[in-house]
Image (cartoon, rainbow, N blue to C red):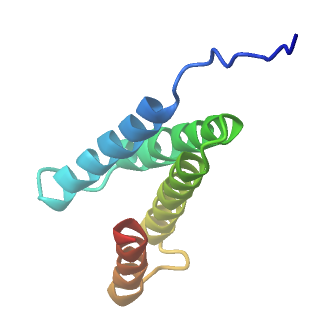
Amino acid sequence: MERSIKDTTANPAPLGLLGFGTTTLLLNLHNAGLFEMNNMILMMGLFYGGFAQIIAGIQENRKGNTFGATAFTSYGAFWWTLAGILMLNNAGYLATDHIALGSYMFVWGLVTLI
């Protein structure tokens, strides 16, 4: 008789999707002019948009879901890098101009489209 181990862990996709969606919503509220760039957006980008999505990506990898692992880990890294860029810009250290930031967003737009 063949025995197998049954995976009873929860689906990590809702965590990854919520991390991306809520952080994106807050950034877009800022982009719409409702409030200035602030630490709330940056911390959401680092921890919920970034860290939580990377955890979800690792969990998806353990479940054998290559697409989920790649998507969540990549977008988690996106939020970490975006928050880092914005924090460095706010500090005036290694500031990124609008052309460079626009190029960064364009590349991520292509990744999302593909």
Residue 98 pos. (x, y %):
33, 84
Q: Identify the residue at image location x=38%, y=76%.
A: 110
Q: Is residue 62 left or right of residue 21?
A: right
Q: In which quadrant of the rendered image does the C terminus lie?
A: bottom left
Q: Residue at the bottom extreme?
A: 99
Vertical side of 61 occupied by 63: above or below: above
Q: Identify the residue at image location x=48%, y=66%.
A: 91
Q: Is residue 51 left or right of residue 18?
A: right
Q: In which quadrant of the rendered image does the N terminus lie?
A: top right
Q: Identify the residue at image location x=58%, y=55%.
A: 70
Residue 83 pos. (x, y %):
47, 58
> Where is residue 102, by image quadrant?
bottom left
Residue 32 pos. (x, y %):
12, 58
Q: Is residue 61 left or right of residue 73?
A: right
Q: Identify the residue at image location x=55%, y=58%.
A: 74
**Count of labels shown?**
0
Q: Residue at the top extreme?
A: 1
Looking at the image, which is closer to me, 34 or 3? 3
Q: Residue at the right extreme?
A: 1
Looking at the image, which is closer to me, 74 or 104? 74
Vertical side of 113 occupied by 72: above or below: above
Looking at the image, which is closer to me, 94 or 57? 57
> Where is residue 101, by image quadrant?
bottom left
Q: Residue at the front extreme?
A: 1
Residue 67 pos. (x, y %):
54, 52
